[in-house]
Image (tube, grey):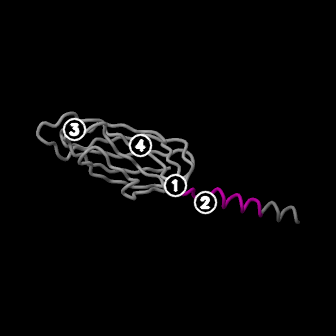
Amino acid sequence: MKNKLFSICLVVIFSVMVATPVLAASNSYSFTMAHRVVDGGKNGQFMRLSKGSASISGSHYQSLAQSGATGPNSVRYTLYNKTSGNSFGTVTSTPTTDGKRKSFSGSYSGLGGGTKYYLLIWKTYEDGRTIKGSGTVSN
């Protein structure tokens, strides 16, 4: 009888563990880049991410081009941890010049988990174009 009760308890515990959803961290972001850098760390836009890897998906577009604008330059999305100062990779995408949204996605690895992750969104140099974008970083 004890063995049967023990077996039933194990089945119930295992069933609850299997049925319990794993909560994924998902963080939205949006930005307007009038020059060449948007720094989530300086703007206080921190994200909570779990240990392991994370993915980014989003879109961006040119909202304004000054007279004589060059490029467009590629926009880089680098994930950092404020506490450690570590970088976890960069995802790069070049916006179109016709004002249409361009989608992109990528991944970051080696995260330790926590609440102090942020995006540094940047271009190598000023190109006279204002870029707007949004998306999610999740794992």
Report the disc number at residue 20: 2
Q: Is residue 21 magenta?
A: yes
Q: Residue at x 43, y 57 (%)?
A: 46
Q: Main secondary structure of the magenta part?
A: helix
Q: Mark 3 or mark 1, which is nearer to you?
A: 3
At label 3, counting other C-alpha atoms closer than 10 Å, the crowd grade (few under 14, some 14-19, many 20 or more) is some
Which residue carries the number 4 mark? 78
Work out whether mark 2 precedes mark 4 in sequence or the reverse, and give the earlier one.
Answer: 2
Q: Position of residue 98 (x, y in %)?
A: 18, 39
Locate residue 129 relative to residue 77 in the image: left or right: left
Asked whether disc 3 touches disc 4, contact meaning CB atoms under 8 Å apart, the reply is no
Q: Secondary structure at mark 1?
A: loop
Instruction: Magenta stretch: give its range.
Output: 9-24
- Residue type highlighted by circle 4: Thr
For label 1, the residue is: 24
Cα distance between the residues tagged 1 and 4: 21 Å
Q: Amino acid at mark 1?
A: Ala
Identify residue for label 3: 127
Does the CB distance between marks 2 and 4 fall below 8 Å? no
Q: Badge 1: how crowded within 10 Å, few (<14), some, or many (20+)?
A: few
Instruction: Pick the residue in front: 74 or 59.
Output: 74
Disc 2 or disc 1, which is closer to the eye? 1
Q: CA distance from mark 2 to mark 4?
A: 33 Å
User: What secondary structure is found at the residue carrying circle 4?
Assistant: strand
Q: CA distance from mark 3 to mark 1?
A: 37 Å
Contact, mark 2 vs mark 1 (Cβ under 8 Å):
no
Residue type, label 2: Thr
Of helix, strand and loop, which one carries label 3?
loop
